[in-house]
Image (cartoon, rainbow, N blue to C red):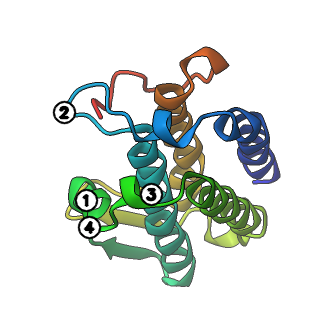
Amino acid sequence: MEQIAQHLLETIEKALPLLNQISDAEALSKPRPEKWSKKEILGHLIDSASNNQHKFVRTMQAEQHVDFVGYAQNFWVEAQAYNKANWLEVIALWENYNRHLAHIIRNAPTEKLENTISIEGSEHFTLRFIMEDYGEHLKHHLKQILPEAGFTSSFENLYNT
């Protein structure tokens, strides 16, 4: 899991200076009324980090399997009013939350990596898979914020947000 954690940290390091170059006005702008702004996309990534922290820890805590409740991502973004938040504070929260997730991934007990999780009745996924997949989701949305940065994800067409 060291490699997964390191890759997450490298993604953070690559994105951070580029995110800090975006003005608050640019971060607030929506490409279309129904689409998220850059602030909202980064806010969604904070929400994803929060939800995945729970998934990681609860799957480690389980004997073998845990059922997990999903979350309504649009509601979470709206409820937290990311567009009204300070852009630099949103960046800092995103950075630090993801550094913490890298720490969790790095220290996940090997014997727990095959524990499984299902989300709202989905198929079962191993802890190893959800930890690996987290970085792919992160890169997918970073590509939306920073298209010139060259982030690539293994599931580019999966999400429409």
Instruction: Tell me the distance, in whole angstroms, between the alpha carbons under discs 3 and 1.
Output: 14 Å
Residue bearing the label numbered 3: 48
Tag 3 and tag 4, C-beta contact below 8 Å = no
Tag 1 and tag 2, C-beta contact below 8 Å = no
Residue bearing the label numbered 4: 79
Disc 2 crowd, CA 10 A, few/some/many (<14, 14-19, 20+): few
**Between 34 and 123, which is closer to the camera in this rendering?**
34
Q: Which amino acid type corresponds to the residue marked 4 in the rendered image?
A: Ala
**Residue 120 image-quadrant placement:** bottom left
Q: Which amino acid type corresponds to the residue marked 2 in the rendered image?
A: Pro
| Sequence-earlier tag: 2 or 3 | 2
Tag 4 and tag 1, C-beta contact below 8 Å = yes
Q: Residue at x 32, y 29 (%)?
A: 158
Q: Secondary structure at mark 4?
A: helix
Disc 4 crowd, CA 10 A, few/some/many (<14, 14-19, 20+): few
Q: Secondary structure at mark 3?
A: helix
- Horizontal and vertical percent for residue 156? 42, 22
- Which numbered dot is residue 33? 2
| Sequence-earlier tag: 3 or 4 | 3
In front: label 3 or label 1: 1
Instruction: Tell me the distance, in whole angstroms, between the alpha carbons under discs 2 and 3.
Output: 22 Å
- Horizontal and vertical percent for residue 36? 31, 39
In front: label 2 or label 4: 2
For residue 54, above or below residue 17: below
In front: label 3 or label 4: 4
User: Looking at the rendering, in which quadrant would you find the N terminus?
Assistant: bottom right
Instruction: Tell me the distance, in whole angstroms, between the alpha carbons under discs 3 and 4.
Output: 14 Å
Question: Can I make out residue 132 in this image?
Answer: yes
Instruction: Tell me the distance, in whole angstroms, between the alpha carbons under discs 4 and 1.
Output: 4 Å
**For residue 48, side relative to residue 67 (left or right):** right
